[in-house]
Amino acid sequence: MEKGKGVMGSRKWAVEFTDNSSTPSTRDIPDPPGFTRVPHDQDDSTLSRQKKDAEANWKSQKAWEVAQAPFKNLMMMGFMMWMAGSTVHLFSIGITFSALWQPLSALQGVGKVFAPYKDSKVDLLAPKLLFIALNLGGMLLGVWKLNALGLLPTHASDWVSSLPPAREVEYSGGGIALH
Amino acid sequence: MAMAIKLSLILLLCLSSLLAPSFSLFEDQVGLMDWHQRYIGKVKHAVFHTQKAGRKRVLVSTEENVIASLDLRRGEIFWRHVLGPNDVVDKIDIALGKYVITLSSEGSILRAWNLPDGQMVWESFLSGSKYSKALLTVPSNLKVDLDSPIFVYSGGCLHAISSIDGEYLWKKDFAIESSVDVHQLILSGGSDVVHAVGVTDSSQFDTYEIDVKNGGLLKHTSASFPGGVYGEILPVSGDRFVVLDASRSVVLLITVNNGATHLQQTHVSDLIHGSSENTVILPSKLSGIFSLRTDSCIVFVKVTDEGKLNVMEKVDKTVVVSDALALSEGEQAFALVQQGDSKIELSVRLVHDMSSNHLKETVKMDHERGFVHKIFINNYVRTDRSHGFRALIVMEDHSLLLLQQGEIVWTRDDGLASVIDVTTSELPVEKIGVSVAKVEHSLFEWLKGHMLKLKGTLMLATPDEVAAIQQIRLQSSQKNKMTRDHNGFRKLLILLTRAGKLYALHTGNGRVVWSTLLQSLRTTSQQQCAGLKLRQWQVPHHHALDNNPSVLVVGRCGLSLTSPSALSIVDAYTGKELQNLGPAEHSTVQVITLPFRDSTEQQLHLLIDADKRAHLYPTTPEAASIFQRESENVYWYSVESEAGILRGYGVKKTHSSEYSFEARNLWSIVFPAESEKIIATVTRKPNEVVHTQAKVIADEDVMYKYISKNMVFVATVSPKASGPIGSATPDESVLVVYLIDTVTGRILHRMTHLGSQGPVHAVLSENWVVYHYFNLRAHRYEMSVIEIYDQSRAENKDVLKLIVGKHNLTTPVSSYSRPEVTTKSQSYFFTHSVKAISVSSTAKGITSKHLLIGTIGDQVLALDKRFVDPRRSLNPTQAEKEEGLLPLTDALPIIPQSYVTHAFKVEGLRGIETIPAKLESTSLVFAYGVDLFYTRIAPSKTYDSLTEDFNYALLLLTIVALVIAIFVTWVLSERKDLQDKWR
């Protein structure tokens, strides 16, 4: 506002429509004819409340939309996983790891995703929970796929293979006499 | 972590299952990582062929049963034939100027080979009635009905055989009338009579005159001498012979004159004034002269026309005398070699003029070659029509040298044809601080080489450049460096030969880095020494990095098992004998490398003597204290294959001296002598590394391998079937195989193969044994596999318990805990008969294994272990297929591309040694016999490195191009952005 005044220093008068003060903006110049500086607090408040409600509605609607977005992702992931098959190769591993990584990165940025819809009147908890649940679902899908590919250490063999053979207490040598 | 391991394992599995079972190489890859050396062995006989213009050659027969034609100019092999191990060459000669005649197998096989190319022309089998010395006489100018007969005395019969086609002309059996033992066949020039000179019952001298046309006996004279004879009768002149009497103190001169035989005795002591022990008549045939060797000297004795013996000359006993060589004017020459310090003196004398040397030359000689053992001489006519001589000498280390005009024209290290044992040594670590100029030069060379290669890949190279590329690849200086390399491909192969010489060969190109004739193993006149075993003595790792690695050579001085042993320790980098521990007071029948080291990284060894006492080496207090601490857990066993007994021993608490220990017998297994005879025993290689104890089978299930180093595989056959194949009926022959724990003597597994017999060749590795035998019922060779699994650990299958570490898988195991075992086995037909079986070995034991089979054709075949998996079934399930299990077939496939020796043959193959490289995927293979062959194999392909012909230049170029592209696109995008902003 200060800046505007500075720029418009040569102007005689100016009307601030959003100015709710009852006094004219400039003392020496009267308000233009037809302009009544009547404070209409009542109307304004209802209007802004309506506006705010609409906005809140819109925000919560958007938030729900955002929260449901991973579902589409999930479906697509599922389809791609089905396409990838159950053998270990570059494609299936790539898909599986992206299926694991996407929900993870999404979960990390939960706050950021819902930040534009932050409002005192909007309850973001439910959409957030849905978002988290869906992402977790996505991750589960990834883990399931990983397991289906046989890459999870869920079998005894996975834990035993890295164990070195047991040391033998006794040592024995010999054989047929050298000749 | 576990996931990563699993991932890598699965990737590995996929990789290996994607591979074809073979790993052939391209034609231009031959010689890149393999080398092949051809040898012939210690020369026994040599015949020169230098008459005609053209290629001058020498024909030799050797102790490795090789007959070969060598280029006299360079010593290269024109052609060579390796006869079987039982086909010992007795005599060799040239007939008709175009055939090489060989008599072998105690005179029972006579063969003719075409002189220029070595093709066999004919072969005759001679049958005799009894064993006798084999004699061969090829008359040079005898014609009988347009044929030139060859006379062979063998098996108590005199055979005349046509030299043109090997047909029998006639046969005269001496054994019918008397038990004469013919010593010489003499053909006097021009006459049609063969003289056979021999001894009956070592007390009667017989001469037979036989008609060359029909074998009719013309005349037979005999004379008896009651004293008996020792050794051979030697002809001195046409009608005179000399022989020693049984006491070796009297020389008998025999004169045959008009049917009468006259004997004349002369005491050796009259000829040699002084000691005359161990007198022998040397077999050099010189006209009118014979030579006697005693312990002190050699004398040349001339037989005068009146029958008097005149001593002409006395020379040192180390002098080696050649056979007489007929010169043009009926004159004879022979050569003497006198051993000097780091030089030898060769003198040629004429028989008629013994007083002076016809020729005398001094030749410098590497003292690592030892003494001269044999000499063969040949003459040539110089431009001034005088005679020049060339001499072929065989040295103590079995090397062959040609001397001419006082120079060594060529040498052949033929000692390498008789390798006894092999070990390896790492090369020294590369010193840091290489000069800049060298780096720059090599960088430039490197770039140039890679640019050439790039051209080659892009098909832009000219034929010259292609040749240059091949040259670069073959003569890469990288592989021949004398320093350790990152991949562990460069090593020293240390070989102990039968001559008692130690050779170090570089794995890069097979060149001899050093060679040492071990003083402790040199055969002297008193005793015959031979090497037995070669072991790594000191392998510096951490504590003693300044020391060079060293090897222990165990030998024996004498022929019996109780002879004293000779020990020496040799520096592996220089070949210097660091320590000569012999002759030790004890004998050695077993060498056991203990798994303990002292503070200087010396490996502890136990040497077991014939009285079952154990001797500890090194003999230091530290080693003794280490051994005392561990002695409770040290055991050994002996296999007495003659008696059919296996015995196990432990160390007694009370010891006879600080470094020698008494044994206590713990167990014995006695095989019933009437039904079982031990024919083969095999143990695991002591340095084998096993990566895991678990075997993952289909559906992620686990089986625990029974991995014990104390396991021996023993194969027995019924005594009737211990002969060659076909000597027993299927009903009589039974093959029984055992897996025995050598600590407790417990028989882990026993299996009977009815109707099968040996020879058995086997290899034991990890928890499996593969063995090869003959199935008499199927008339085919078979290979069987036994895999042994530990049942006592099978319960360890709970994942949670494994995660928190509640399992007994890593707790030390004792054989006394008697773990329960189960086995799986399967048999397959195999086409080839086998000379040796080995298995690839890698640094960590992760890589899958290949069996290396030395076939009867002297090649090495690599067979994937997956083909001998007892879990193979006719219709594997999907899970089993994924695991890489192959469907069962009745025979093992032989894929021609999987011969690791590709186009080469390792003649007389005796052993295959595998050495792990530092690179896990790769195993070094060294096969030895008469020839040597070395290569690298990668059973699961080189999954852990780029191949040698990987094009770094192309990679570099691609990277540079990418960087440029990134830069250009970045500039372009910046410009576009700017334009967008101005819009």
Image (spheres, grey):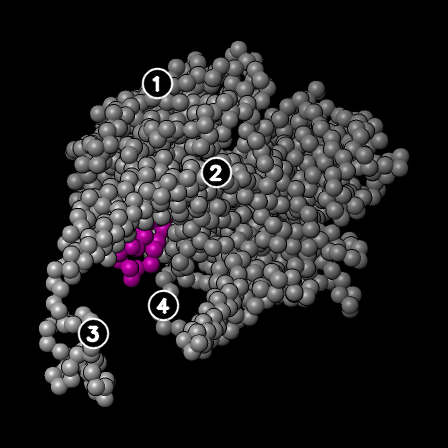
Q: Are marks 1 and 3 in contact (CB under 8 Å)?
A: no
Which residue has dot 2 on it?
Answer: B17
Which label sits in the foreground, 4 or 3?
A: 3
User: What amino acid type should be assigned to the residue bearing mark 4?
Assistant: Lys
Tag 2: amino acid: Ser
Q: Disc 4 versus disc 3: distance between alpha carbons? A: 100 Å
Q: Chain of mark 3?
A: A
B868 relative position to B360: left or right: left
The percent coordinates of residue A48 (x first, y second) are 18, 59
Label 2 chain ID: B
Q: Residues within 10 Å of mark 3 (few under 14, many from 20)?
A: few
Q: Is residue B74 visible?
A: yes
| x 36%, y 62%: residue | B429
Label 3 or label 2, whichever lies nearer to me, is 3
Q: CA distance from mark 4 to mark 1?
A: 57 Å
Of the two numbered discs 2 and 4 in the rendering, the one whose residue sits closer to the viewer: 2
The residue that disc 4 covers is B431
Report the chain holding disc 4. Answer: B
Q: Quadrant of residue B426?
A: bottom left
Residue B188: x and y in percent read: 78, 41
Front label number (4 vs 1): 4
* Residue B876 in picture, x, y percent from top left: 47, 25
